[in-house]
Structures are given as C-alpha cells and as structure tokens.
C-alpha cells in the first residue's frame, strides 16, 4: 500500500536527516587488566597532524635535494675547479637546474596541500637550503681547505633569496594546479 511512497511517521519532521546523539559506552578494553591506556583526543590529533606536517615538508625538500646535490657535485668538480671560476658561461646550466628544482619543489608542496601551500613551501626550501649550504661550507673547509670570500657570501645570500622566491612562486603555481583539476 505504501510501497515507493514517503510516509510521515512524525519521528523526523520534514524528512530531515536525524543527527541523533551517539551513545556513550564504557570502553570494555579500558576496564581490562592488561589494556593499554588510551590516548586523549588532543594528543592523537597532534601526533597525526605533526606527522602530516613533516611529510608535507619532507617530500618537496627531498625533491630539491635529489636534483640539486648531484648537479652541485658535478658543478663543483668540473675539471678540478668550479665552473663559475673558469670564465665561461657554462655554469648557467647547473644554476638553472638547481633553480628549477626549487621551483618544482615549491610546486609539489603547493599541489600536495593547496590550503597551506606557502606554509609548506618555505620550510621545505629552507631545509634544503640549509643542507646545501652546510655541505658547501664543509666542502670548502675540509676538502679544499680554503676560506669563504665575502663575494661568495654575497652570492649565497642572493641565492637564498632567489631560492625562497622560486619556492614561493612554485607553491602558488602548485596550488593553482591542484584547485583547477578538470
């Protein structure tokens, strides 16, 4: 008789979804003698978010380092001295590859988390920059046994600003690509 028709049984007015309360059951496992103590909601959420944050920063930083480290090794050991010291413009190619690594690292950070693209791109680029600069300082002091001229420090500062800007631009590009999926 009422097959296929909606019936008003006065339980839920206007046929809206009911948002009933959830039963609060005592946890049987919590009463057990050998049960592991249950973590509170804030602690679980914090651990989960922290793991997500680290993953969202580590993957783009890894991309930058995987591309940049081999390029920098080849550039620094080109015929026994860095390419930039030889007077040719051949050093522009490795510089372009490292710059594009920062751009693509920022784009990956923006694509993976569009809502916090800049917030993930800056720490990942900063981490990669710290690793690259630390390796360069160690190479200069321990391998080559030379100091760092002030002109090189100025170039490093310019490179830091450029790498962070490229990472920011890449994050905005990645966010745009993630939100405009068809």
Image: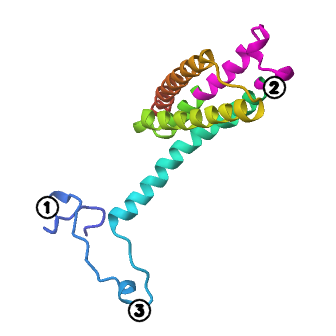
Point out residue 156 in the picture as x, y percentages from the top left corner.
59, 22
Which percent across, then down, holds residue 158? 54, 18
Number of residue marks: 3
Task: Using the image, determine if residue 14 lies above or below residue 91.
Answer: below
Residue 64 appears anywhere in the view: no
Label 1 environment density (alpha carbons within 10 Å; few <14, some 14–19, many ≥20):
few
39 lies left or right of 26: right
Q: Residue under circle 2?
A: 77
Task: Please tell me whether residue 108 is drawn above or below residue 165 in the rendered image.
Answer: below
Q: Quadrant of residue 89?
A: top right
**Residue 127: x, y in percent?**
55, 38
* Location of mark 3 (residue): 33
Instruction: Single out the residue that lies furthest toward the right.
Output: 79
Please tell me whether the stretch drawn in magenta is mainly helix, strand or loop.
helix
Task: Tell me which segment is drawn in magenta.
Answer: 76-102
Which of pointers 3 and 2 lies earlier in the amino acid sequence?
A: 3
Q: Earlier in the sequence, mark 1 or mark 3?
A: 1
Q: Earlier in the sequence, mark 2 or mark 1?
A: 1
| Residue 136 seen | yes
Which label sits in the foreground, 1 or 3? 3
Give the structural element (helix, strand or loop) at label 2. loop
Q: Which residue is mark 1?
A: 13
Categorize mark 3 by other alpha carbons within 10 Å: few (<14), some (14-19), many (20+). few
Residue 162: x and y, percent?
54, 20
Q: Do residues under tags 2 and 1 come within 8 Å of each other at their CB atoms?
A: no
């Amino acid at each position: 008789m009422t097959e296929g028709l909606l019936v008003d049984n006065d339980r839920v007015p206007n046929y809206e979804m009911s948002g009933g309360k959830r039963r609060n059951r005592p946890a049987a496992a919590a009463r057990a003698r050998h049960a592991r103590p249950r973590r509170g909601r804030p602690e679980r959420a914090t651990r989960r978010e922290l793991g997500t944050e680290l993953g969202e920063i580590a993957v783009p930083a890894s991309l930058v380092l995987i591309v940049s480290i081999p390029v920098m090794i080849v550039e620094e050991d080109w015929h026994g001295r860095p390419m930039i010291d030889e007077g040719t413009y051949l050093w522009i190619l490795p510089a372009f590859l490292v710059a594009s690594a920062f751009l693509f690292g920022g784009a990956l950070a923006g694509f993976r988390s569009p809502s916090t693209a800049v917030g993930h791109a800056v720490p990942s680029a900063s981490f990669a920059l710290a690793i690259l600069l630390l390796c360069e300082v160690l190479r200069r002091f321990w391998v080559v046994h030379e100091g760092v001229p002030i002109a090189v420090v100025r170039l490093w500062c310019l490179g830091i600003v450029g790498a962070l800007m490229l990472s920011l631009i890449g994050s905005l590009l990645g966010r745009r690509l993630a939100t405009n999926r068809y």
